[in-house]
Image (spheres, grey):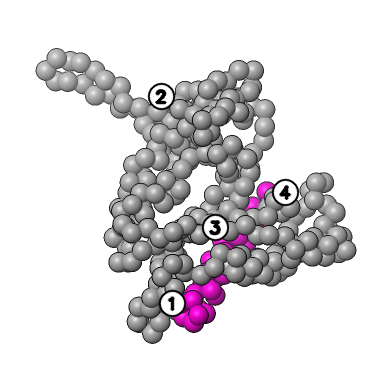
């Protein structure tokens, strides 16, 4: 943890971050240090003293997220339905990465809304389900290689409700075809993107899209672009589902165990057995 805190402190000296990121980094940088406060425990029999430092409690902190993760899992286990669940992933096309990074709040909402509404629309179709499913959605913005990659993980019930009645899928092998879902998701995403154009802010890297012709060209490219989606086979056991999904809900960007070295401002870390 000391190494991560050192990296954070050096990064904040050399880079500027938005207010939310700065606040989180400040909290993590002083987690379990005297700066955050501490408790002094003293044994009344032998007078042995022990210093207990306080945690920052930030959900992005490698030290603080474990207990929060367990609490989150237990709360959702109580709310889960007695059915199997699909794990569905919806991604943002790479040609929108820069615009998304510059307009995170707006663009993340589009990603989350379009991916969920596309599932609801697919399930509403009688040839697949003809009912409304339950969806638990989590936003992620990075890959194992720490590259920017905005995407959503969703747990979706293998069935749904219609007029207070539980409805099973028409096909016992899949909820709906992933290719069909990808196309519906793409259409809904582009529809939402068009609505917010006047709210988007463009930097020097994306200024070209202030021009109507360039914006229209981008939209046309998106209609041709594959919106990558993924549907994993159903989970049978609710506890297995939530333990797995809890790791997504409370997965920090990087942990101390993945860091190989930090020298001259360069961080080397492991991912799937490799080092970058």
Pointer 1 local density, CA inside 10 Å: few below 14, some 14–19, many at least 20: some
Q: CA distance from mark 2 to mark 4?
A: 39 Å
Q: CA distance from mark 2 to mark 3?
A: 45 Å
For marks 2 and 3, the one nearer the N-term is 2
Q: Quadrant of residue 215?
A: bottom right
For marks 1 and 2, the one nearer the N-term is 2
Q: Residue at x 59, y 37 (%)?
A: 145
Magenta highlight on residue 114: yes
Q: Quadrant of the C terminus?
A: top right
Which type of secondary structure does the marked residue at label 2 adopt?
helix
Tag nearer the camera, 4 or 1 = 1
Q: Nearer the viewer, residue 188 or 104?
A: 188
Magenta stretch? 101-130
Position in image of residue 149 (x %, y %): 62, 47
Q: Nearer the viewer, residue 254 or 118?
A: 118
Q: CA distance from mark 3 to mark 1?
A: 20 Å
Residue 230 is tagged as 3
Q: Are marks 4 and 3 in contact (CB under 8 Å)?
A: no
Position in image of residue 166 (x %, y %): 35, 78
Residue 7 is tagged as none
Q: Residue at x 66, y 65 (%)?
A: 186
Tag nearer the camera, 1 or 2 = 1
Q: Quadrant of the N terminus?
A: top left
Q: Are marks 2 and 3 in contact (CB under 8 Å)?
A: no
For marks 3 and 1, the one nearer the N-term is 1
User: Looking at the picture, does residue 50 appear above or below residue 224?
Assistant: above
Q: Residue at x 56, y 61 (%)?
A: 112
Q: Which residue is mark 4?
A: 98
Residue 34 is tagged as 2
Position in image of residue 7 (x %, y %): 56, 26
């Amino acid at each position: 943890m000391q190494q991560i805190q050192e990296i954070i402190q050096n990064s904040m000296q050399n880079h500027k971050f938005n207010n939310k990121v700065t606040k989180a980094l400040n909290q993590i940088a002083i987690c379990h240090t005297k700066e955050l406060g501490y408790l002094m425990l003293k044994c009344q029999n032998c007078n042995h003293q022990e210093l207990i430092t306080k945690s920052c409690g930030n959900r992005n902190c490698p030290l603080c997220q474990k207990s929060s993760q367990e609490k989150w899992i237990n709360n959702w286990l109580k709310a889960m339905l007695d059915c199997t669940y699909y794990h569905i992933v919806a991604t943002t096309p790479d040609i929108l990465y820069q615009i998304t990074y510059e307009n995170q709040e707006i663009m993340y909402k589009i990603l989350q809304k379009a991916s969920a509404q596309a599932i609801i629309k697919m399930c509403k179709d009688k040839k697949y389900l003809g009912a409304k499913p339950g969806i638990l959605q989590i936003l992620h913005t990075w890959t194992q290689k720490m590259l920017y990659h905005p995407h959503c993980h969703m747990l979706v019930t293998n069935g749904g409700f219609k007029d207070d009645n539980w409805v099973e899928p028409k096909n016992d092998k899949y909820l709906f075809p992933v290719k069909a879902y990808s196309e519906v998701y793409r259409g809904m995403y582009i529809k939402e993107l068009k609505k917010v154009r006047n709210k988007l802010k463009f930097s020097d890297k994306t200024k070209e899209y202030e021009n109507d012709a360039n914006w229209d060209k981008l939209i046309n490219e998106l209609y041709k672009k594959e919106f990558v989606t993924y549907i994993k086979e159903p989970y049978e056991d609710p506890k297995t589902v939530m333990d797995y999904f809890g790791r997504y809900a409370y997965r920090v960007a990087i942990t101390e165990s993945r860091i190989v070295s930090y020298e001259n401002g360069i961080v080397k870390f492991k991912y799937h057995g490799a080092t970058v």
